[in-house]
Amino acid sequence: MDRNMFTGGLPGTISRRGFLRACAIATAAMGLPMEMVTKVAEAAESPERPRVIWLHFQECTGCSESMLRASHPDLATLILDLIDLQYHETLMVGAGHQAEAAFEKAIEEPGYVLVVEGSIPTGEYEDFCMIGGHSAEHNLKKAAKNAAAIINIGTCSAWGGIPVARPNPTKAVATGDIIKDKPIINIGGCPPNPHNFLSAVLYYLTFKKLPPTDIYGRPLFAYGRRIHDHCERRPHFDEGRYAEQFGDVGHRLGYCLYKVGCKAPETFGNCSIIRFNDVEVWPVSVGNGCYGCTEPNFWDTMSPFHERLPGVPLPVNGGTIANATDIGKKALGITAAALAIHAGIGVAKSFAKGKKKEEE
Amino acid sequence: MAKRVVIDPVTRIEGHLRIEVEVRDGRVVDAYSSAQMWRGLENIIKGRKADDAWMFAQRTCGVCTTVHAMASVRSVENALKLEIPYNAQMVRNLIVASHSLQDHIVHFYHLTALDWVDIVSALKADPNKASAIAESYQSWKLNGASVFRSVQEKLKKFVASGQLGPFASGYWGHPAMKLPPEVNLIAVTHYLQALDYQRKACQAVAILGGKNPHIQNLAVGGVSTAINPDNVATLNMERLYYIKQLLEEIRDFVQNCYFPDCMAISAFYKEWLNYGKTGEYYLSVPDLPQDTKGELFDIPGGTVINGQVKEIKSFYDPYFINNVAENITHAWYDGDWTRHPWEEETVPKYTGFKADGTVDEKGKYSWSKTPVFKLGNDYVPMEVGPLSMILVGYLTGHKLTKKWTDKALGMISSVAKTEVTIENLKSTAGRNITRAIRAAMMADLALKQWEQLVNNIGRGDLEIFNPPSYPKGEIRGCGFHEAPRGVLSHWSVVHNGGIMKNYQEVVPSTWNAGPRDAKGRKCPYESALIDNPVAESEKPLEVLRTVHSFDPCIACAVHMIDPEGKEIVKVKAL
């Protein structure tokens, strides 16, 4: 609530009695029973929850759905105790002009966090996603104007995601292709682990700054490491033990999934560490390779999904054996190499090109 | 005097939907449903490997996660006539059943309940009385007065903050809201508890699928979930019993809390057992296959036409595969035809709205096509969803359907103090009731699939995958699935040794949300709205009740148009 209504904009300038009278008026104005006056007074004196506006464009709502799976905090704690979620089409009660009015009101006062889910169709396709008679691009620009920061949830708003997969039928783009003058954080994933999103929000609320990111705008706390380098099946990779096909002996023994299409060697994320749904799983743990969904343009660069990623050097002759003196230096060298790849190349090279090169 | 009311955006659904109704003397006399978003997903699938299609197709919708993946792999397997191992069938069935449970819980409590439940009224409730009322109609373990008191305290603090977040724009105090404060408090409390139970259902899916939403354990030919009771890194007894524990907890919630809540609220709003009927054409498909071919099912499917039921018996049944078609008379595509999904060509042609911003009734007005079913020489729109599934099961004497349907009818009749019959389920309230019946059945069936999987593993069968082998020539397949919102079918045309040549999705929300057909007959959303009461045309809560009873999913409904398509919508919500 606007605390100025109690103080005329000057904190501490009205008497306690005057304050309570104002609370009583506010209580009546909100249509609440009079026994709520003390609650209203308490609330008026406690800090405001930070405002969040969540927009949906060309998306499948999978990212919003992932929030329903979050546990720390859970969705109820998030929207009742931590943030003031002023606009979210899947959750909000009002529809039609009430929803539109809620949007207009929410973006009036600067300083909110803007969350974007889904890509934005542009050019002659601008009208391919319409909300209340306005295009996605129109609503994004309008909402970004007064935003303190933008958090892109999911690969679609971060880099275009599935709508930009070839042939990109709607000239879809990412938030960052349209909005250039605001700090933007990208939470990659299809959908992302909800805790990566929540941690970014909580980082911002707690430390009053955005988390440091890699060159793709992904927070280091979640995307600062190659999945392959922190995979529980890495020893099998290093020792040359692979599943060759789903259901074969190697697969049944929990061996490395690289040969059945795992893209973890070129994917950055924390899937193997924080895992999903609080049941200790991620795709590799059940027997399916990583599809690289936290990487930009993974739909084109990482498919076919069940085929081996080309260009990954394999260990030979029973894995990596070295003496203890050398091994520390070697590890440092690998880290430096990994960082260089991360910064410069990423997964920009296409699957087919890599394969061709490998064949040569 | 008639008044046009446009609701855009319709919220608490997936995607972007616009509903336009004409209201005269407090009743809806005409209705138009229009889908508002397009991504071109099927165009993106074309030219890629048939093995990968399910990954892309699953992104049709994140609310209906898993379902498009299932229909997609089934469609390619159907084209190849490829059987999948029994274990793979059971793993898929467990995912289907668990996902249904999550989806139905979320629809009832988090998407539609707020059309019937007044949160602000719950502030006035007496928690002791609420506890007594809850105990009187259900045996749910979390109905103590202290539970209701603590939720009410939390709610008071939240409302008093004035920062109402997503609840700020509600229809609180609307004249169509009828529940006593105590029942509102019960519903709000269960809204919060339901968040925990839907999460458990997601966990059961994730243990098999690697994550949720959007599972990552399917393959054309089976699943990639490795099974080995003697290994540390596979589906073993620890994992299996984790699933069982979750399924038992969910069953407790669904059968002892969600089911009776739905019946009680429906009884309070018994007049809604008479609004929202669409007609006499219902379609469902069988699901939870019990063999490797798809000829035996735990849930029956078929058509119910003027009360006559005809079953669909296998994944290859021509009664379904030959008779599904789509019509574009009133959809923004060039031409005026009705064609089988494999034969469709799709050239968009946008004609917009009329100058006054309302729909062009005689022309085209939605991106959603009109799916139809061939009956003799006619093609008719059909209603799909849990209502259709329950009607088919009830009329074919399916035991589990009959058990839970009779229980539901008995409960509502006793609370409403009037006799409620199966005919009353063809209504707005009936759609929510049949969804709860389906959930209760799925809770039993999920555990049945679990038993079967474990028994089969116990027999030493660890098979999960039959590798596909693609011929050079062209093959065609249909994969159907009785999804939470009803009949879903994916249609594949594969050529060149495994490349997708054409791909079509005929989706539950398209069946229900489509515009009028070639003969001007309304599709289910439109026909269900006729005669609905509207107390305040500025706050058309009653329209939302009926639209939400279908559980709309618009990302699902709109698909497959050419890149040249163009849409310009100038309408503001009135």
Image (spheres, rainbow, N blue to C red):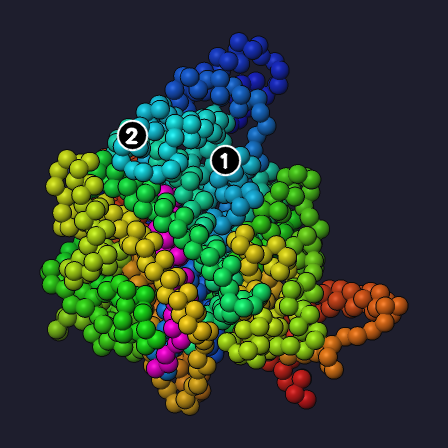
What secondary structure characterizes most of the magenta part?
helix
Res B441 → quadrant: bottom left
| Stretch in magenta | B81-110
Placement of B485 over or under A77, stated as above or below:
below
- At 27% from the left and 57% from the top, the residue drawn is B385
- At 51% from the left and 59% from the top, the residue drawn is B238
Q: Which of B404 and B278 is in front in this view?
A: B404
Q: Position of residue B524 (x, y in %)?
A: 22, 56
Is label 2 or label 1 in front?
2
Give the farthest residue toward the front. Answer: B459
Q: Position of residue B367 (x, y in %)?
A: 33, 62
Q: Confirm whether circles 2 and 1 share one chain.
A: no
Label 2 residue SS: helix
Q: How many labels does the image show?
A: 2
Q: Where is residue B562 in the image (x, y as percent from the top left)?
A: 40, 71
Three-letter amino acid code of the residue under disc 2: Ile
Q: Nearer the viewer, residue A338 or B459?
A: B459
The residue pinned by badge 1 equals A80
Chain at numbered mark 1 = A
Label 1 residue SS: helix
Looking at the rendering, in which quadrant would you find the C terminus of chain A?
bottom right
Q: Please give the label number shown on residue B133.
A: 2
* Residue B92 covered by magenta stretch: yes
Residue B332 visible in the displayed image: no
Left or right: residue B433 versus residue B490 is left
- At 29% from the left and 30% from the top, the residue drawn is B133
Give the farthest residue toward the right. Answer: A325
